[in-house]
């Protein structure tokens, strides 16, 4: 067996080099696909609202993934100045009851229910932020969505 390998070594070495070249090319192409993400974030202000009594901000978001690979949403954050709030599922029963009184679809269409966005699709849902400070008039906020390899930012007014 070793005699066969030694006599055909001039064939095995080029085959091994071709295999390594193809493998390196495939790894580089995969890395290019991961870097080349094309995401778009949009907010529907007509479906977004702020409840002053319960200090709950509900924002309707659409995340479009025009990439050739799926994307995972890691967290959704609402910021204003130095204050930031993470999107959550309502935890207390009173918050759930207040949301049901406002709109029954908000709990069902929570953006955190579907954090995986397949390639070439879009996901629409609500981001719910609790304990958002009371505002007397409309205020500018930033929505920040952190995905597995990109951060999306959008300015909104509540």
Image (cartoon, helix red, strand yellow):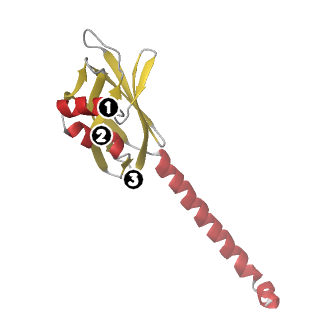
Q: Residue at x 65, y 66 (%)?
A: 20
- Label whose residue precedes the other's in the sequence (3 or 1): 3
Q: Please, is residue 110 above or below residue 68 in the view?
A: above
Q: For residue 68, which numbered disc appears in the image?
A: 3
Q: Circle 2 is placed at which residue position?
A: 110
Q: Please, is residue 77 above or below residue 83 in the view?
A: below
Q: Secondary structure at mark 3?
A: loop
Left or right of 98 in this view: 83: right
> Is label 3 in contact with label 1 (beta carbons under 8 Å)?
no
Measure how far apart labels 3 and 1 are at the Cα level.
29 Å
Q: Residues within 10 Å of mark 3 (few under 14, many from 20)?
A: some
- Label whose residue precedes the other's in the sequence (3 or 2): 3
Measure how far apart labels 2 and 1 are at the Cα level.
7 Å
Left or right of 2 in this view: 79: left
Q: For residue 14, which numbered disc appears in the image?
A: none
Q: Residues within 10 Å of mark 2 (few under 14, many from 20)?
A: many
Q: Nearer the viewer, residue 101 or 139?
A: 101
| Residue depth check, mark 3 versus mark 2: number of the one nearer the observer | 2
Q: For residue 128, which numbered disc appears in the image?
A: 1
> Is label 3 in contact with label 2 (beta carbons under 8 Å)?
no
Left or right of 8 in this view: 78: left
Q: Secondary structure at mark 2?
A: loop
Residue 19 location, quadrant: bottom right
Q: Residue at x 24, y 32 (%)?
A: 97
Q: Residue at x 62, y 64 (%)?
A: 21
Locate the N terminus by quadrant.
Answer: bottom right
The answer to whether any part of residue 44 appears in the image is no
| Residue depth check, mark 3 versus mark 1: number of the one nearer the observer | 1
Q: Please, is residue 4 above or below residue 47 in the view?
A: below
Given the current orientation, which residue lies at the most extreme top position?
136
């Amino acid at each position: 067996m070793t005699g066969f390998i030694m006599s055909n070594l001039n064939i095995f070495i080029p085959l091994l080099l071709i295999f390594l070249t193809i493998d390196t090319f495939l790894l580089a192409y995969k890395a290019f696909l991961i870097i080349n993400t094309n995401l778009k974030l949009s907010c529907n202000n007509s479906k977004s609202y702020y409840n002053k009594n319960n200090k709950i901000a509900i924002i309707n978001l659409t995340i479009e993934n025009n990439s050739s690979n799926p994307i995972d949403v890691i967290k959704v954050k609402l910021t204003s100045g130095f204050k930031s709030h993470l999107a959550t599922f309502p935890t207390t029963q009173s918050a759930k009851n207040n949301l049901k009184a406002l709109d029954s679809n908000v709990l069902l269409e929570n953006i955190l229910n579907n954090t995986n966005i397949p390639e070439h699709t879009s996901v629409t849902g609500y981001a719910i932020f609790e304990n958002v400070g009371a505002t007397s008039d409309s205020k500018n906020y930033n929505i920040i969505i952190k995905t597995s390899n990109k951060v999306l930012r959008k300015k909104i007014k509540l």
